[in-house]
Amino acid sequence: MYRAAIDNGHNSISSTDMNWILASSGTVKWASLNSSDTSIAGGAESGSCLDDWAFEWANVYINFSHFNAIAHTADQLQCTAVHEAGHVSGLNHRLSSDVSIMNISHNTRCHSFVIKVVQPSDVTDFNHMY
């Protein structure tokens, strides 16, 4: 379930107006966050080359402790994967009232709305940054 949700999340980012450019030597790693804190669903970090804005590296983490402690669907896991990929892209959290993959509340974003893909507001934020 984890691999399919992560792959679907990655594909949904790649098929939006937020295209990732990975430097020819760059890598994207999806890995476990290895945190025992079940309140944390995931994490992300990245590095890019300012000359061409290509990602040199990106790490997207899923906290398996969170997903093993509380039952989640594949769609809810994909929600977290796309949210963390948004952080890699430089997006910040949005208010809990916004319909956005970057909504600050995991419960709102992944349980109430079950947002699985980048939303128009996220694309607008991304385009304002770059």
Image (spheres, helix red, strand yellow):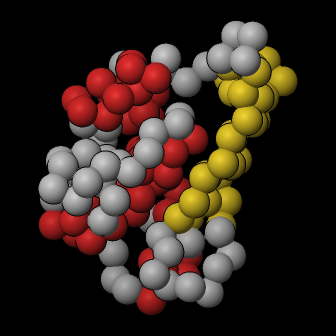
Q: Is residue 98 left or right of residue 104?
A: left
Residue pictured at 56% horizontal, 85% vertical: 37
Residue pictured at 45% horizontal, 81% vertical: 39
As drawn, the residue found furthest toward the top would be 52
Q: Quadrant of the N terminus?
A: bottom left
Asked whether residue 75 is in view, the answer is no
Q: Quadrant of residue 21?
A: top right
Question: Eyeballing the image, is 70 above or below 109?
Answer: below
Rendering coords of residue 110 (x, y %): 28, 63
Q: Quadrant of residue 125?
A: top left
Residue pictured at 67% horizontal, 60% vertical: 31
Q: Is residue 47 left or right of residue 14?
A: right
As drawn, the residue found furthest toward the right would be 25
Rendering coords of residue 69 (x, y %): 45, 89
Rendering coords of residue 103 (x, y %): 30, 54
36, 72: nearer the viewer = 36
Rendering coords of residue 49 (x, y %): 76, 21
Question: Eyeballing the image, is 13 above or below 113?
Answer: above
4, 110: nearer the viewer = 110
Residue pictured at 57% horizontal, 60% vertical: 43
Asked whether residue 40 is in view, the answer is yes
86, 90: nearer the viewer = 90
Count of numbered badges drawn on the protein: 0
Question: Eyeballing the image, is 120 above or below 66?
Answer: above
Q: Is residue 98 left or right of residue 75?
A: left
Question: Eyeballing the image, is 89 above or below 42?
Answer: above
